[in-house]
Amino acid sequence: MKIDFNGKILEIEQNISLEEFINSKKLDPSKIIVEYNTIIIDKNKWASVILKESDSLVVLSFVGGG
Amino acid sequence: MYIMNDFEKELLKFWGEEKLSRIQRVRVGIAGAGGLGSNCALFLVRSGFRNFKIYDFDKLAYSNLNRQFYFYDQVGEYKVDALKVNLLRINPDLNLEIFRDEITYDNVSGIFKDCDIVIEAFDKAECKKMLAETYMRSGKLYITATGLAGWGDSDEIHIRKITETFFMVGDFSSESSPDNPPFAPRVNIAAAKEADIALEWTLKNKF
């Protein structure tokens, strides 16, 4: 199935949770914001969200320095 | 109408009355007075902004002088105290509120309530995340920076517009570390882009 990930269409497997998807991208949960269909989802809820066809996911990553 | 100082009279010649009064009505909140915050504030003051709330709990160290808008004889002072002195030397009539407080999950949502623009100028990625979660959907203009350490490839530092009121600046990858510390040129490019986004947005919107 297809989802929109940071503005690009991505083919992923069925029945994947948001947590599994984030882990597969090797992103550090303490330094990212995840917007699922334009709503920010806290990391303690990622496991309970199962991705569906046409979902929109925006992941904002932060790196240190300032 | 208050009485303008001589610098503001010159700003008036650059901007004209309508634009300058817009710039002078806006209140800018800056989270952090390090490399990004001190320089971004500097650029905004030079552009005509008058109203600021600036937070930083840290004291100035010699290591900060490689990129932050401070001077040798200010080392040991609270950054916000030193920044106030430095900014007032450019425009002595700023309405500048400074706070020696750490921004945490306990106070983050309240501190910039009365600001039109919030600028993230932290060092740590976790703090950048915290501020973005709070202000990226607040309706205020929110500007954050990520990826500015090191040197070279400075055209990689660019602006990503996430929404009408949420902008990210940086190369999105150059993380600060002992092997790749932040230096003045790239930090200033990011700080200047943050300031320019604030300026453009202020001139486009009605206040």
Image: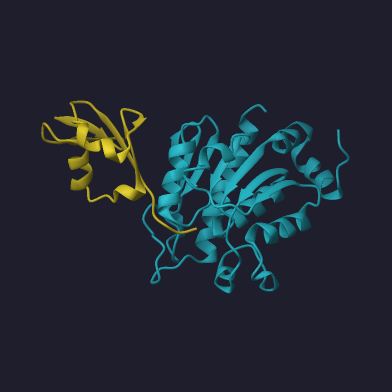
Chain colours: A yellow, B cyan
Tally of marks: 0
Q: Residue furthest left?
A: A14
Judge from the rendering whether residue B75 lies leftward or rightward of residue A44; answer left or right.
Answer: right
Tell me the quadrant of the picture where the N terminus of chain A can be found: top left
As rendered, which of B153 and A13 lies closer to the eye? A13
Q: Is residue B91 above or below residue A35?
A: below
Q: Quadrant of residue A42?
A: top left
Q: Residue at x 80, y 42 (%)?
A: B13
Q: Is residue B155 above or below residue B75?
A: above
Judge from the rendering whether residue B50 lies leftward or rightward of residue B122; answer left or right.
Answer: right
Judge from the rendering whether residue B74 lies leftward or rightward of residue A27; answer left or right.
Answer: right
Q: Position of residue B182 (x, y in %)?
A: 47, 65
Q: Residue at x 50, y 61 (%)?
A: B186
Q: Does residue B83 appear in this view?
A: yes
Q: Does residue B49 appear in this view?
A: no
As rendered, which of B38 and B23 lies closer to the eye? B38
Q: Is residue B41 above or below residue B2?
A: below
As rendered, which of A45 and B157 lies closer to the eye? A45
Q: Position of residue B95 (x, y in %)?
A: 75, 44
Q: Quadrant of residue A63?
A: bottom left
Q: Position of residue A28 (x, y in %)?
A: 29, 51
Q: Residue at x 64, y 70 (%)?
A: B76
Q: Position of residue B174 (x, y in %)?
A: 39, 59
